[in-house]
Amino acid sequence: SAVISQKPSRDICQRGTSLTIQCQVDSQVTMMFWYRQQPGQSLTLIATANQGSEATYESGFVIDKFPISRPNLTFSTLTVSNMSPEDSSIYLCSVKGQGNQPQHFGDGTRLSIL
Amino acid sequence: TQLLEQSPQFLSIQEGENLTVYCNSSSVFSSLQWYRQEPGEGPVLLVTVVTGGEVKKLKRLTFQFGDARKDSSLHITAAQPGDTGLYLCAGAGGTSYGKLTFGQGTILTVHP
């Protein structure tokens, strides 16, 4: 399966600031996704990162808060904007090939906002 | 909206015991994945089941996909402390192309 590198692995940020998380894959993939997860809980999909066009956001998530880029088939970024303590979470990227190929996940970014 | 009900939410057992985790839905999925996640890491794919009635074995782990492709189970035989982690089922297909519908997760703790 693809090797997925996510950076940073963790960060502690001040409220009101923004952080950009990077996701790099070692091979071209069809789809890339961004998730949020509270420790010990399931995953919530934030958006689908579309190559060359605007991301598709799930209900409850908006572009102004979570701008996403996907300039090519191997790279995507998620920015968490104007952070508040409620944004403290684990942010994960995942990738998927064509057809019935499963999703594979990066190791996540553990974000704490003070 | 597709939902996947996963149970139990928590399991705390002794080494050597058997256990089963269930995922149920009213929706049909084209495939279903099981993941295991350890603290500080992302979910790692254990198996994908595609065909209704399919049974897959991975050492002490047995995965089953329901005949109607609406439910799945994970059975672990003779659990070991190394099996400890968060187990997640996720269904693919239906009206949400490419996206996964996740269950709530099962936190398994196996005590030595």
Image (tube, grey):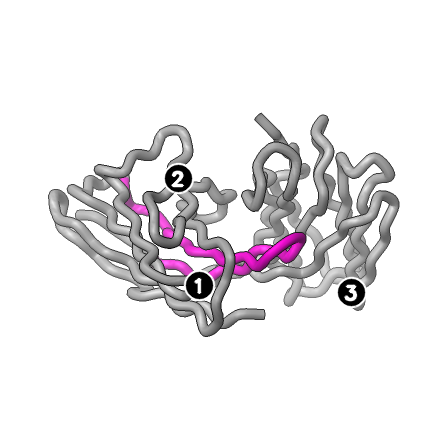
Report in which chain the residue with disc 3 lies.
Answer: B
Q: Nearer the viewer, mark 1 or mark 2?
A: 2
**What whole-number distance in Å separates the C-alpha atoms at marks 2 and 3?**
35 Å
Residue B35 is situated, as x and y percent measured from the top left of the image, at 62, 55
Is there one chain holding both mark 2 and mark 3? no
Q: Secondary structure at mark 2?
A: strand
Q: Is residue B68 visible?
A: yes
Judged left or right of residue A50, residue B45 is right
Is B60 magenta? The answer is: no
Asked if residue A15 lies left or right of residue B98, the reply is left
- Identify the amino acid type marked 3: Leu
Amino acid type shown at disc 2:
Thr
Specify start and end residues of the magenta stretch as a single range. A87-109
Q: CA distance from mark 1 to mark 3?
A: 23 Å
Q: Are marks 1 and 3 in contact (CB under 8 Å)?
A: no
Asked whether disc 2 touches disc 3, contact meaning CB atoms under 8 Å apart, the reply is: no
Instruction: Name the residue carrying label 3.
Output: B58
Q: For mark 2, name the chain.
A: A
Q: Which mark is residue A56?
A: 2
Q: Specify the amino acid type for callout 1.
A: Asp
Q: Residue at x 85, y 50 (%)?
A: B54
Q: Residues within 10 Å of mark 1 (few under 14, many from 20)?
A: many
